[in-house]
Image: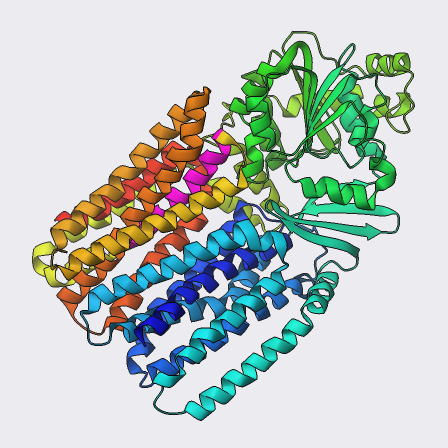
């Protein structure tokens, strides 16, 4: 039975990770996904798995008499819950009364994700603890927890890399989750011979489930297309396709085609006004543009406007080739001639990576991407990126990007975002101009006096080119660039105090964008974002230390009660640290080397590999009776020291541009860092179980559930706080420092 149970435990980890990736991608599409929505959904996932282990597993597993039968029924439920959750997510916009692409408030996002994820996540946490109890049999308890932990990690890592690199590219979400559900029935069938009672009932249940899944398979394509149509109503859904980089959706409303990527609005065709503004505002700043670089959004009509000028070359960088493929399919009238023009060079790669690598220079560079709504997008609005742009911009060149704004009234939240970007530009470029409007266009150049915001000059240049435009003409320019509007914008962008510059390792602009986003909804949540400062974060850390020292002073009187708490606190802060290590490593990799998707999958898988190695090594030590408190303290010391190393390595490799450093960093160092982090985390969990059982005794299921739950609760808190508050406010070095301080507090608690 042990081998069959091993297969089942690996499959639980596999199912959990595959379902997590699929369901979180689907929620991100509904929630207009940024770090806030990702933080909420990931926190919800970790919270409910923790409750499943700490709550259900801890209190109910020991009371279950027919454990194996319950485990088999759990596998059956695991076959259905992800499928049903996906179906509920697809109908979520109708339930919330929102339109596709509409920004959803914090509260609906919070309760919707927590309610939808609860059933399956509770089941996963419960099955882990139940699996620990069944797997232990008559062997030494703590080592069996370690082995179940390893098996779960093997399944998780396999599922993560398989779904990221292969499954999402080839199959839709319903097919993937239904297939995974079918796989969960295999160990259930294999475990039947070990059941002593209720065999007939269990077999009939499995046969019913098997027939149900086969019926679902027969209608799987219909269910997928029907639920997608309902999700995107009232728009007519033309297609929804997945690639390595995300989900791309094309909808139609009368004669307009709208493109969405991961739920984020990209562009609408035709939208001649927007295209004319993006192109002509920038091109009219240059006396005679010849070579142009466009990053993102070219197939929505921008390229067609560009080719009205006598250009020699356009380098168009679009990360996802699926966007161009779908544009060519659904709007051929706009793309068939443009994409075949010999002057156009399409580069399907990360825009930041292209800028870093290219040796060409350009007259005009336009970043046509969404505003810094996510940490991924924020990379295109930082001081370091602007410096890379300056390197490839010719002396009389023009750099341009646009941010959603308002022509007549700019609120305080909007002002903070615009001001941070304006001041960041000023640290790099000599000349800066900002145009008012529904979109504020930023222009930057190397030479003083090279740019203009005088509408008469721009109108004359347009006339000299003899270019036909529908909107960007004399009457429009005179209204859009009126003296009153320009003076008002300049007054709002005049800094009253020191403004934080947006940098790679301190992405403050995307924090301001989240404040702006929350200002559309509940005022209390907007205030929550504004009251959290660096000083208050460090004050919370100081309060944490005060509580620690109070317990240390009471250690002689309450040692028997305090010692187990010191082990549990170390597990909690390590869970917080481990999720932080993943976030900062992934973000730093994207900053330094660009968005190389398969490498990101390697980083995530490397972490799980380290977890497996650490768990296996410490479990072997425990079997040889070598696991003790002194070793646990040494492991906690590693958790404290690791975050001090990360910022130093990130800084070193961000400054190096030679080929050897680039190769070592992208292929070796960033693949090795998660292995180290995972190894440290893998060391702690089995040993914490051993120490707690040794000191407190009790049931294995209660100990496994408690420590597993605390580990996940720490990760849950980290997932929410790090991405949304701590990282953008303190930056990557400050975040690593805070994580180190929290774990040093746990270390002191252990030592004393």
Residue 352 vs residue 552, the one in the foreground: 352
| Quadrant of residue 97 within the rendered picture | bottom right
Q: Look at the image and tell me whether residue 728 can be seen.
A: no
Side of 442 where 155 appears, left or right: left
The percent position of residue 174, horizontal first and vertical second, equals 62, 64
All told, the count of numbered labels is 0
The percent position of residue 747, horizontal first and vertical second, equals 20, 46
| Residue at 18% over, 66% down | 693
- Any magenta on residue 576? yes
| Quadrant of residue 495 within the rendered picture | top right
Q: Look at the image and tell me whether residue 263 can be seen.
A: yes
| Quadrant of residue 557 within the rendered picture | bottom left
- Any magenta on residue 633? no
The percent position of residue 327, horizontal first and vertical second, equals 78, 42
Magenta stretch in the rendered image? 571-592
Side of 270 where 433 appears, left or right: left
Q: In which quarter of the image is the N terminus?
A: bottom left
Q: Is the magenta stretch mostly helix, strand or loop?
A: helix
Up the image or down, 149 lies above or below 190; here it is above
Up the image or down, 244 lies above or below 116; here it is above
| Residue at 23% over, 53% down | 617
Tell me, what colour scheme is on the image? rainbow
Residue 278 vs residue 752, the one in the foreground: 278
The percent position of residue 447, horizontal first and vertical second, equals 65, 7
Residue 570 vs residue 518, the one in the foreground: 570
Up the image or down, 741 lies above or below 18; here it is above
| Residue at 45% over, 80% down | 189
């Amino acid at each position: 039975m042990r081998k069959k149970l091993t297969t089942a435990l690996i499959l639980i980890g596999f199912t959990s990770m595959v379902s997590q990736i699929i369901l979180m991608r689907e929620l991100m599409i509904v929630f207009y996904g940024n770090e806030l929505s990702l933080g909420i959904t990931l926190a919800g996932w970790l919270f409910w798995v923790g409750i499943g282990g700490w709550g259900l597993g801890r209190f109910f597993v020991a009371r279950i008499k027919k454990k194996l039968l319950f485990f088999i029924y759990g596998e059956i439920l695991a076959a259905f819950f992800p499928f049903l959750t996906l179906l509920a997510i697809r109908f979520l916009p109708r339930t919330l009364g929102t339109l596709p692409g509409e920004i959803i408030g914090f509260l609906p996002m919070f309760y919707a994700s927590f309610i939808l994820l609860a059933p399956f996540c509770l089941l996963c946490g419960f099955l882990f603890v139940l699996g620990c109890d069944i797997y232990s049999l008559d062997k030494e308890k703590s080592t069996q927890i370690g082995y179940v932990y390893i098996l779960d990690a093997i399944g998780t890592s396999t599922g993560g890399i398989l779904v990221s690199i292969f499954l999402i590219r080839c199959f839709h979400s319903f097919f993937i989750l239904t297939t995974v559900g079918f796989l969960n029935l295999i160990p259930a069938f294999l475990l039947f011979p070990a059941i002593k009672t209720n065999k007939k009932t269990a077999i009939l249940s499995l046969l019913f489930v098997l027939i149900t899944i086969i019926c679902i398979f027969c209608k799987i394509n219909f269910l997928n297309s029907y639920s997608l149509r309902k999700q995107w109503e009232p728009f007519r859904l033309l297609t929804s396709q997945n690639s390595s980089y995300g989900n791309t959706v094309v909808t139609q409303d009368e004669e307009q085609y709208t493109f969405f990527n991961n739920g984020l609005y990209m562009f609408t065709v035709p939208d001649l006004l927007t295209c004319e503004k993006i192109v002509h505002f920038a091109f009219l700043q240059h006396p005679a543009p010849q070579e142009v670089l466009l990053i993102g959004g070219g197939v929505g009509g921008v390229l067609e406007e560009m080719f009205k000028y006598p250009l020699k070359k356009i380098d168009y960088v679009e990360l996802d080739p699926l966007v161009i493929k779908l544009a060519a399919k659904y709007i051929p009238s706009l793309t068939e001639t443009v994409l075949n023009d010999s002057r156009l060079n399409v580069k399907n790669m990360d825009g930041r990576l292209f800028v870093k690598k290219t040796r060409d220079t350009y007259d005009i560079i336009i970043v046509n991407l969404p505003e810094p709504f996510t940490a991924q997008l924020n990379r295109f609005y930082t001081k370091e990126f602007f410096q890379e742009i300056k390197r490839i911009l010719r002396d009389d060149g023009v750099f341009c990007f646009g941010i959603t704004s308002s022509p007549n009234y700019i609120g305080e939240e909007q002002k903070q975002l615009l001001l941070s970007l304006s001041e960041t530009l000023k640290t790099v470029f000599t000349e800066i101009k900002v145009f008012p409007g529904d979109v504020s266009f930023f222009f930057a150049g190397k030479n003083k006096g090279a740019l203009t915001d005088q509408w008469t000059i721009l109108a004359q240049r347009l006339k000299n080119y003899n270019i036909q435009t529908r909107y960007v003409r004399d009457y429009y320019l005179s209204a859009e660039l009126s003296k009153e509007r320009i003076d008002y914008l300049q007054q709002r962008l005049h800094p009253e105090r020191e403004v934080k510059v947006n940098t790679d390792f301190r992405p403050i602009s995307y924090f301001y964008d989240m404040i702006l986003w929350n200002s559309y909804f509940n005022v209390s949540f907007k205030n929550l974002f504004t009251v959290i400062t660096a000083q208050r974060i460090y004050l919370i850390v100081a309060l944490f230390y005060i509580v620690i020292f109070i317990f240390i002073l009471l250690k002689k009187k309450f040692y028997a009660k305090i010692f187990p708490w010191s082990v549990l606190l170390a597990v909690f802060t390590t869970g917080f640290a481990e999720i932080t290590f993943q976030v900062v490593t992934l973000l730093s990799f994207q900053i330094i080397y660009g968005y190389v998707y398969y490498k990101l999958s390697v980083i995530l898988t490397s972490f799980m590999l380290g977890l497996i190695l650490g768990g296996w090594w410490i479990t072997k030590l425990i079997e040889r009776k070598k696991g003790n408190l002194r070793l646990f303290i040494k492991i906690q010391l590693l958790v404290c020291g690791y975050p001090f190393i990360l910022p130093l390595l990130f800084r070193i490799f961000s400054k190096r541009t030679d080929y050897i450093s680039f190769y070592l960093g992208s292929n070796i160092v960033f693949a090795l860092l998660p292995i180290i982090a995972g190894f440290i985390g893998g060391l702690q969990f089995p040993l914490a179980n051993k120490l707690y059982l040794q000191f407190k005794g009790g049931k294995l299921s209660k100990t496994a559930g408690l420590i597993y739950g605390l580990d996940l609760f720490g990760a849950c808190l980290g997932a929410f706080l790090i991405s949304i508050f701590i990282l953008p406010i303190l930056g990557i070095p400050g975040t690593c420092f805070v994580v180190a301080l929290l774990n040093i507090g746990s270390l002191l608690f252990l030592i004393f």
